[in-house]
Image: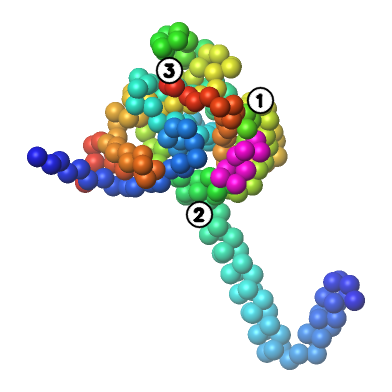
Amino acid sequence: MTYNLKFDKLYSYSMDKEGIAIPVKLKLGAKETYFEAFVDTGASYCIFERMFGEDLGIDIESGYKRKIRTVTGVFFAYGHEVTLSVLDYELDSVVYFAENEDFGRNVLGRTGWLNRLSIAIIDYDGQIYVSRYDDEV
Amino acid sequence: MSASQQLQEIISQTEKLTNEEQLKLASYLMEKLSLKNEASSIREEEKVSDPMRKLEYQWLAEHRSEYSGQYVALDGNKLISHGSNGREVLAKARELGAKRPYIVHIEEDNGSSFGGW
């Protein structure tokens, strides 16, 4: 049995990086901030460095505090609703900003991003196919 | 002859032209200027509308190793600021007037690999 999927868009990502790194834009009101983040299908949430939340004028600690477990320990992050734009798709999502200033990794995880899109990755070719989950293609 | 002298010379020559010729010259210059502005706004539009930041990744492909372990702020294929403190790099890019600085943390090339969380 074979399965066929259809997608709206195809993007090529840089093969120079360790991981699938793609550009992200966060928007809140009139403020916008832009940075690189990694696709992480194993992450439950989208978690970003706190400086990007602060760049949007967010008081980080005023958000919903969540304890995040990793293989090596735990850390805390705060959830805030922003407009998350990745690969031409704009989503109003709750994303998390790390409490610790030294947290130096930005990840696009399931809640608020992956669970709102349909995605296929051909990593050998550095290609990512995307559609909005609720779009009929 | 300096550039300003040359310009003065051209202006004085245009005074010898008929009204019709002057209008033709004015129209030529206006069209040229408008094409230039259009090209520049198309370039800006391309930068703004590219969700994959091709220009920034071209720059990274050429310069990544020079900035190992640092944050870089890029605008198109231009480096705006860099350093080990991401917050300072972003603030500097804003201070320098970058409208859409793209921040990338170039991981240190120390022989180790990221193993996930």
Whether label 1 touches label 2, CB < 8 Å: no
What's the CA distance linking mark 1 and mark 2?
A: 30 Å
Quick one: B89 or B22, which is closer to the camera? B89
Q: Quadrant of residue A55?
A: top right
Name the residue type under label 1.
Asn
Seen from the viewer's position, the closer of residues A73 and A115 is A73
Task: From the image, tell me which residue sits under label 2.
Answer: B46
Quadrant where the N terminus of chain A is found in the figure: top left
Q: Chain of mark 2?
A: B
Label ID, residue B85: 1
Identify residue for label 3.
B117
User: Mark 1 or mark 2: which comes first in sequence?
Assistant: 2
Dot placed on the residue nearer the N-terminal end, 1 or 3: 1
Whether labels 2 and 3 share one chain: yes
Q: Residue at x 63, y 32 (%)?
A: B68
Which stretch appears magenta?
Answer: B60-67
Toward the front, the furthest residue is B111
